[in-house]
Image (cartoon, rainbow, N blue to C red):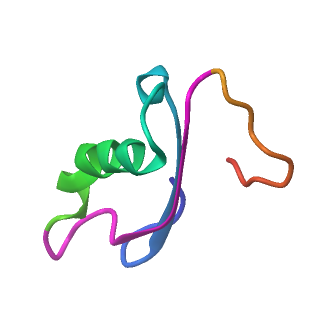
């Protein structure tokens, strides 16, 4: 994750649990995992401006951002 409070962050998650899941299902899993980080006035994550999910066997595409 990048950024700080009151800022939109980008998230990239690689996990084998995404195998066989649609992009929407994978993204819902991530949002569910970070929901507590987005609650309240003092939440450390204000918003997510980009969410990329992939399985551990999928490769990054040329030009994709990463930390």
Q: Is residue 25 above or below residue 56?
A: below
Q: Quadrant of residue 39?
A: bottom left
Q: Is residue 20 left or right of residue 36?
A: right
Residue 55, how many percent across, how many down?
56, 28
Question: Is residue 38 located in the magenta-colored stretch of the structure?
Answer: no
Residue lying at 54% horizontally and 59% vertically, measured from the top left: 2
The x and y percentages for residue 31 are 30, 52
The magenta region covers: 40-56
Q: Quadrant of residue 18?
A: top left
Residue 17 location (% of width, % of height): 41, 24
Q: Is residue 60 left or right of residue 42?
A: right
Residue drawn at (36%, 44%), measured in percent from left and top? 25
Residue 7: x and y, percent? 44, 76
Q: Is residue 54 above or below residue 24?
A: above
Q: Exactly how many numbered labels are in the figure?
A: 0
The image quadrant of residue 5 is: bottom left
Name the outermost residue toward the left: 40
- Taking the spot 79% from the left edge, 45% from the top edge, the residue there is 61
Instruction: Name which residue lies at 33% across and 72% down.
Output: 46
Horizontal arrangement in the rendering, residue 45 relative to residue 57 (left or right):
left
> 35 above or below 20?
below
Is 43 one of the magenta-colored residues?
yes
Name the one closer to the observer, 4 or 38.
38
Q: Residue lying furthest right in this view? A: 62
């Amino acid at each position: 994750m990048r950024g700080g409070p009151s800022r939109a962050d980008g998230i990239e998650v690689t996990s084998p649990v995404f195998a066989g899941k649609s992009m929407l299902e994978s993204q819902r899993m991530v949002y569910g995992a970070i929901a507590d980080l987005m609650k309240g006035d003092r939440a450390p994550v204000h918003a997510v401006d980009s969410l990329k999910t992939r399985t551990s066997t999928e490769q990054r595409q040329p030009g994709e951002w990463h930390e």
